[in-house]
Amino acid sequence: MKRWFKYFMNGFLIMAPITLTIYILISIFTWLDEMFDLGELPVVGHIPGLGLIVIVILLTLVGVIGSSFIVRPFLVLAERILAKVPIVSIIYSSLKDLFDAFVGDNQKFNCPVVCKMSETPEVHRMGFITQDDLSSLHLHDLVAVYFPHSYNISGEVWFVKKENVRFVELPSSEVMKFIVSGGVAKL
């Protein structure tokens, strides 16, 4: 019976990530298709994935228009208005900072490090330097390091002595994948 249970668990460990990934992808495609349900097109009928195609085209079009020097002042004005509305400003600025941290020109998680957290026993932790100058907080010999949590979308910011920080010569995306996977992903 133990052998059959072991086979069952092996099958579960093989199939769970695959089926969950497929389920999430199908759910996203279905949601996008429902969001952009253009009805049955008379010539070709229902087109699976049309929602995704419409989203890609729409976002690209907004990016082209948003990059225009004519539209830029209106975007700045809209951001200023959103920044002044109570509650909305907190949500908007938090989301904007989060997206800016991962994509765009001002990526924040681009400096992976290993930090020595204690002397005995010697413990190290991987993270990303987010601020290397904390003089505004009167913390001249410290840096701000973000430590993502494994299997989660959260993390913590710690102030670590500069002498306990060692830079990692690896792509940030690989380090993030390693941390988020709980250290099981290969570097």
Image (cartoon, helix red, strand yellow):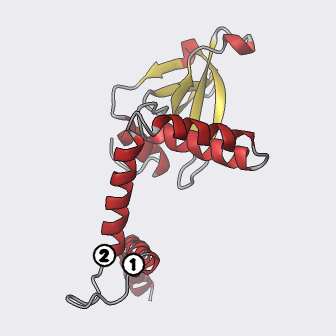
The tag earlier along the polypeptide, 1 or 2, is 1
Q: Quick one: label 1, few (<14), some, or many (20+) residues within 10 Å?
A: many
Residue 20 coordinates in the image, percent (x, y): 42, 74
> How many numbered marks does the figure carry?
2
User: From what the image shows, is residue 139 above or below residue 167?
Assistant: above
Task: Tell me what residue is drawn at x 56 percent, y 35 percent.
Answer: 76
Furthest toward the left, the residue is 43
User: From what the image shows, is residue 61 above or below residue 89?
Assistant: below
Residue 73 coordinates in the image, percent (x, y): 52, 34
User: From what the image shows, is residue 4 above or below residue 91?
Assistant: below
Which quadrant: the C terminus? top left
Furthest toward the front, the residue is 70
User: Which three-letter amino acid code belongs to the residue tagged 2?
Assistant: Gly
Furthest toward the right, the residue is 86
Q: Where is mark 2, residue-wise?
A: 49
User: Which three-letter amino acid code belongs to the residue tagged 1?
Assistant: Asp
Distance from Cα at disc 1 to Cα at disc 2: 6 Å
Q: Where is mark 1, residue-wise?
A: 33
Pointer 1 and pointer 2: residues touching (CB < 8 Å)? yes
Is 107 on the left or on the right of 94, as rendered? Answer: left
Residue 11 coordinates in the image, percent (x, y): 36, 79
Q: Residue 44 carries which label?
A: none
Query: Which SS class for mark 1?
Result: helix
**Which of these two is toward me, 153 or 59?**
59
Residue 80 coordinates in the image, percent (x, y): 65, 37
Which quadrant: the N terminus? bottom left
Residue 175 falls in image quadrant: top left
Is 4 on the left or on the right of 138, as rendered? Answer: left
Is 57 on the left or on the right of 112, as rendered? Answer: left
Task: Tell me what residue is drawn at x 33 percent, y 52 percent.
Answer: 60
